[in-house]
Image (spheres, grey):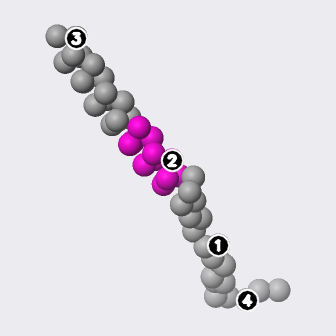
Amino acid sequence: METVLEFIREILKGIVRELTAHFFRNNVLENKTPPSRRRKQKGGSHK
């Protein structure tokens, strides 16, 4: 019974580690900011 609990604990540790690495990789290393776009000028008379 104890070995089964250790086995499950190791599996959960691996899953948590992979998820943490995945989110870290997406949020920190590939920090892609969208390119700043200029606002289109609307028609009409401007002074």
Q: Is residue 38 left or right of residue 8?
A: right
- Which tag is nearer the camera, tag 2 or tag 1? 2
Sequence-wise first label, 1 or 3: 3
Amino acid tagged 3: Glu
Q: Position of residue 7 (x, y in %)?
A: 24, 24
Q: Position of residue 30 (x, y in %)?
A: 54, 60
Amino acid tagged 4: Ser
Residue at numbered disc 3: 2
Sequence-wise first label, 2 or 1: 2
Q: Is residue 19 above or below residue 43?
A: above
Quadrant, the N terminus? top left
Q: Position of residue 17 (x, y in %)?
A: 41, 37
Quarter of the image where one finds residue 3: top left
Q: Nearer the viewer, residue 22 or 3?
A: 3
Q: Which residues are magenta?
A: 17-27
Q: Is residue 32 above or below residue 9?
A: below
Identify the residue shown where x is 63% and y is 82%.
Answer: 40
Residue at numbered disc 1: 36
Residue 24 is marked as 2
Q: Residues within 10 Å of mark 1 (few under 14, many from 20)?
A: few
Whether residues under marks 2 and 1 lie with C-beta atoms below 8 angstroms apart, the answer is no
SS under mark 4: loop
- What secondary structure prevails in the magenta region? helix
